[in-house]
Amino acid sequence: MKRDDWSKILGSPGYTVYQQEIDEKAKTLKLWVRRKRGNRKYICSGCGVRIAEPADISEREVRDLPWGAFRTTVVIELYRVRCPNCGLRIEKVDQLPSKAPFSKRFEEAVGEACESASARRVAKQFGMAESTVRAIDLRCLERWNAQRRLPSLRQMGVDEIYLGKSTKFITVVSNLETGEPLWFGAERKKETLDEFFRSQLTARQRLRIEAACVDMWEPFKSSVEQWAPNCAIVYDKFHIIQHANKAIDEVRRAEFFRKGGAWRGVVKGKRWLLLTRWVNLSQEKRQQLNALFALNRKLMKAYLLKESLERLWTYRYEGAMLRYLKNWTRQLLWQRLPAFEKLAHMLIDHLDGILNYCRVKVRFGVVEAINGNIKTLLRRGRGYKNLRYLLLKAQRMAATKTEFVVFRKAA
Ligand SMILES: [Zn+2]
């Protein structure tokens, strides 16, 4: 093979292969490359300024994409430049984005593999340590994030997610229009969300926010009111239904302990059935629920209340929505369902934010989809110690896939 051909296959513009070494047994290929004769553009890696003459020369060895069955390393000639701003610095080379011993395209191949598989599996595939794979993936994500333009924030979602025993809860702020998480903060206090408004947005950007989808959680509400004066609080249907699910679970447990004996066998394992919407149940499951309801009227009433609450968000006019909610609350009279009475009080206390749905249209289910994505990542990655990595991972997932998830949920 001619020298020129080696350079062609390597495909590094401006560089040429001047020496090569093949080990057929070990299946390795090593290439020495240097600048082509005419390539005399030296750029400072510190500030990006162009320097006329290099100061001295050195070498670096990086892993590159394999050539066929051969694992390939490239030894590249690098120059140092004397920069007026930074002093003595290594030159900037596009194919070497970091100090790590990998070429950019190799890192990108690893990053791409990490999009659909766990770091553990990618590590196996490339024959590297898992921690190295994670570090490469993080760098790829940072590079991707640095070159993209962030859309402005007009509708935000605020939610919390449980990360396990050590980290506990974190607050997740997201952009409802793009379906992308924007920021993670420790705990779920007012100060947490204050920190987001203070550190992530300018005063002008804060004024531009028109709606926030939050849970009925006082600390978040007061933070939004303080920092984003033009923002309407909209209580997310998803969160309210979660509260209704909690209420029905309370009824189930209360009935379970009250009756005891043979009855316990009937209620046992029915938790999931009670939390699932009727339309999503198979014929067989519906029969199981009906059998349960025949034995316990209270559970049936609670289930019907939960089911009918969903209709609240089919109304487009405040008056109609309010009327429906009042009727729903009235059905609770004489039912002796304290869990639902508590829920009704909660809804009445947060009436404004519920009715705001008629005033500002927001996409429901986005917060839920983002939450689901983060949980998928956590399961696949077996936890993330680095929250910045988790955030970038979830953002990338949103940019490439969430749209699909969100629309499927809405359909
Ligand atoms: Zn410089």
Image (cartoon, helix red, strand yellow):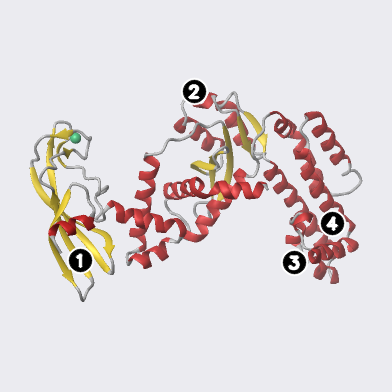
Callout 2: helix, strand or loop?
helix
Q: As shown in the figure, which amino acid type bears the numbered disc 2?
A: Arg
Mark 3 vs mark 2: which is more N-terminal?
A: 2
Dot 1: few (<14), some (14–19), or many (≥20) neighbours within 10 Å?
some
At label 1, the amino acid type is Leu
Q: Where's residue 18, x and y in %?
A: 11, 57
Please report contact status of discs 2 and 4: CB closer than 8 Å, yes or no.
no
Q: Position of residue 336 (x, y in %)?
A: 88, 49
Residue designated by label 4: 299
Tell me how far mark 3 sits from mark 1, CA to CA: 60 Å
- N-terminal-most mark, 1 or 4: 1
Type of the residue with mark 3: Gly
Q: Nearer the viewer, mark 1 or mark 4?
A: 1
Q: CA distance from mark 2 to mark 4?
A: 50 Å
Which disc is residue 204 wearing?
A: 2
| Left or right of 47 on screen, residue 334 | right
Q: Are marks 3 and 2 in contact (CB under 8 Å)?
A: no
Evaluate if marks 3 and 4 touch, with contact meaning CB atoms under 8 Å apart.
no
Q: Which one is in front, 264 or 14?
A: 14
Disc 2 or disc 4, which is closer to the eye? 2
Residue 349 vs residue 33, the one in the foreground: 33
Residue at the spot of label 1: 29
User: Which residue matches tag 3?
Assistant: 269
Amino acid of disc 4: Leu
Left or right: 210 as drawn, with respect to 130: right
Q: Nearer the viewer, mark 3 or mark 1?
A: 1
Which percent across, then down, holds residue 8? 21, 55
Q: Is mark 3 within 8 Å of ligand 1?
A: no
2 or 1: mark nearer the eye: 1
Q: Residue at x 41, y 61 (%)?
A: 119
SS label for mark 1: strand
**Of helix, strand and loop, which one carries label 3?**
loop
